[in-house]
Image: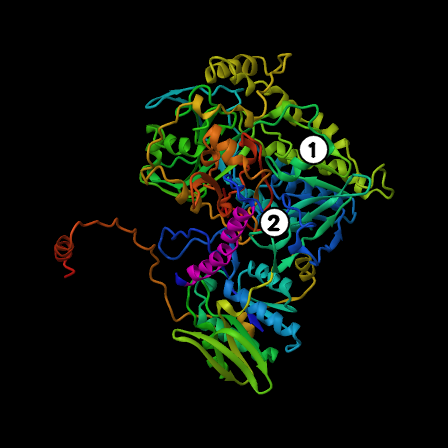
Amino acid sequence: MTKVTCIRALTAVQAERGAPQLYTAVTRRTCSSVTAPRITTHYTIRPRDKDPRWEGVEMERFADQADVVIVGGGPAGLSAAIRLKQLANEHQKELRVCLVEKAPQMGAHTLSGACLEPSALTELFPDWKERGAPLNTPVTEDVFNIFTKNHRIPVPILPGLPMQNHGNYLVRLGNFVRWLGEQAEELGVELYPGYAAAEVLFHEDGSVKGVATNDVGIAKDGSPKDVFERGMELHAKVTLFGEGCHGHLAKQLYKQFNLRENCEPQTYAIGLKELWMIDEKKWKPGRTEHSVGWPLDRHTYGGSFLYHLNEGEPLVALGFVVGLDYTNPYLSPFREFQRWKHHPFVAATLEGGQRIAYGARALNEGGFQSIPKLTFPGGLLIGCSPGFMNVPKIKGTHTAMKSGILAAEAIFPKVTAEEADSETAGLHVPEYAESLKSSWVWKELHSVRNIRPSFHNPLGLYGGMIYTGIFYWILRGKEPWTLKHRGLDAHQLKPAKECTPIEYPKPDGKISFDLLSSVALSGTNHEGDQPPHLTLKDDSVPVARNLAVYDGPEQRFCPAGVYEYVPVETGDGMRLQINAQNCVHCKTCDIKDPSQNINWVVPEGGGGPAYNGM
Amino acid sequence: MSKKKSFLAIELQIRVKPDHSGVVTDGVKHSMNPFCEIAVEEAVKLKEKKLMKEVVVVSCGPQQSQETIRTALAMGADRGIHVEVSGKDYETLGPLQVSKILAALAKKEDAQLIILGKQAIDDDCNQTGQMTAALLDWPQGTFASEVSLEKDGIKVVREIDGGLETIKISTPAVLTADLRLNTPRYATLPNIMKAKKKKIANVKPADLGVDLTSRLEVLRVDEPPQRQAGMKVETVDDLVSKLKDAGKV
């Protein structure tokens, strides 16, 4: 289609003009044998107030006032918004609830397995079935295997084990989020997809005042374009932050309010997922398969899922999770996923099928030990952002929704009170944390708290399974001790010279695929002419440390091919090339960078993946 | 008056439906046609220069067309008209029916200028503007890369195969926007919020006296054939003999 290529060619030309000039200008100025690279142009690293290109540019922002502002339109944010409006209607009070979401439409950035426990949904909407909630696939059979290279050892799912899924539903979470969005709009929530919250705003007394959305129209080199417009400020009595796993504003809030002083650092995994249309003869709607073992060794945490959906066509959702505390910098989660599909048990299902979607997202594994302080003056944290995932069950949606519901119930009396009962301008609602601690979320997370850390023993995976069998299945997690995690995932990598490169098989184009064709299936795109949103605190660290010591692990853990080490144009050496347009907003780089030099910030709203029911 | 179309976003991988009757559109990300964005921008610019009094945006389609109208209202249009077409009618909606709708609306609204994108990037028809002009018997300035309103008419610079052509046409007229006409502005959040207060009128094609029956029937939709691997040859003789074998020479 010639018209599509002509638009893209035009924008590509406009983008390229900036970069080469900058590079040669820097080399002329520095004049030393080591040329300092200039990669990051984002204003969070290169402030605009001292930048001559920004002199005289109007930086005033339009501001608007709401009662509650919610950052993030995922299950937690939407549940909170819905619950607030339900309470407002019940008590016949006026309440302005505004929700901002960086995805262009609700659900477009949502990615999950997913096997949903309907407990929280039933609390929110007892009549969810009549309302048409897309829970179309009740789980009919549960299969758990330990894979070896060519065989499998089935593990019986006894009632009481975390992997037991009776009563749960296989869902396409993106479609579920879209449905939640429709319910929210009907109740009067103001939803603003396509607008990212880029900055937290503070009152004079240090409490949170609200958020500001992203500026638009900044060129790739950081200068203002003709179409430059400031973002908008949304002020609220209280702001809920539901950005999902490893949110970028939450990262700032942890530092600002010291919310992590009494908890362990969060630990994570990366989940990669594909949707396949398979041969009808192999389709078994409601069948839920999980595996551990091959291709990961017993010291690398991870496993797979394969769910047969029942939505009128032979669709399966499958994926692979790798714990980000892995130690070998040569490990590529994407390639582990691709080779796992060749296991005879999995390949049998996929043969003759067609892959129709791909995506990836980081998920929390810290559980109970990593829950931070949840409230601060003017705001609170909900959902996977602080992190309520039940790791052995690999389910976090029901707890995220419940946290949103509890947040709404805690703040409702405060925001509708005649007199603001607060020491600070932004309302502080510690009641939210209290009610969460006495809810089933806390009990559930407490009972499974030792399963993930029990993996760190000489027997690795097998030790973990033995521990689960004894202490969870028999004793229900009541053991008096709490095991610790190993520390920050970023610090677990061993230097490359101490590790062996992994020989991955070439993709066969039928069951396994290369990275770039996979990224194309995520539908991801960003406005090309904007500063890369993968910002580096120090532009020289990637080559000096990440490449030198760890052989550039970001080339391997990014599921979208954003990071590439390429030879410099003149002379010897390598440089880091950041293909920001490919980013699928998974946050793995911010988590796993061994130098903790990468700071993911939000790009222009509307950019990112275009998942459809992932 | 400005017409815009909502269609499947450009960066997506499109899938053909299993029964080959069309492409899958359920839940897929929709955006405003890029050429229509340029058309809306041009209309808003004309209003800002005080050369036009009011910008009305029109979209024909199902419920979700309203979102596209809202974006155009956020860019600066004054009000919107949503012509409701859904289900089977929407699947067979083509340039001829749309231009009949636009012609009827233009007469009803007493429009002086109709600006459209030159073509939609999902079907690439490039027919609606021209057909609308014919139905109204108005002059047309298509593939416009520059538009200036003068005392005695509109000067339009058109992008054509051989280069650029400058014409002058009288009003009322139909223009279609090409890529280099302008750079559309962003629809910022404050403007989206203000746009919620602007009016969108709902109209049915029957109210305009338009019959939506299509004179075209889509027989089959197929994906482009898989690219076959190429072959490398060592010498020219080799190449000639391979071509002969394949019956090409």
Q: Name the image quarter holding residue A5.
A: bottom left
Name the chief secondary structure element in magenta.
helix
A307 vs A99, nearest the viewer: A99
Badge 1 element: helix
Element under disc 2: helix
User: Would residue A18 be counted in the magenta stretch?
Assistant: yes
Dot 2 amino acid type:
Glu
Residue type for callout 1: Lys
User: Where B51 falls versus A72 (above or below)?
Assistant: below
> Which residue, given by chain and number where applicable, does mark 1 sit on?
A255
Magenta span includes B53: no
Residue A319 versus residue A221 in the image, above or below:
above
Residue A436, percent from left and from top: 70, 29
Q: Is residue B45 left or right of residue B178?
A: right
Query: What is the chain identity of the residue bearing mark 1?
Result: A
The residue that appears at 21% across and 49% down in the rendered structure is B232
Residue under the image location 55 percent in, 61 percent down: B65
Residue numbers of the magenta segment: A3-29
Of residues A417 and A521, the one nearer the viewer is: A521
Which mark, by number, is residue A182?
A: 2
Looking at this rendering, what residue extends furthest in the bottom direction?
B152
Disc nearest the viewer among 1 and 2: 1
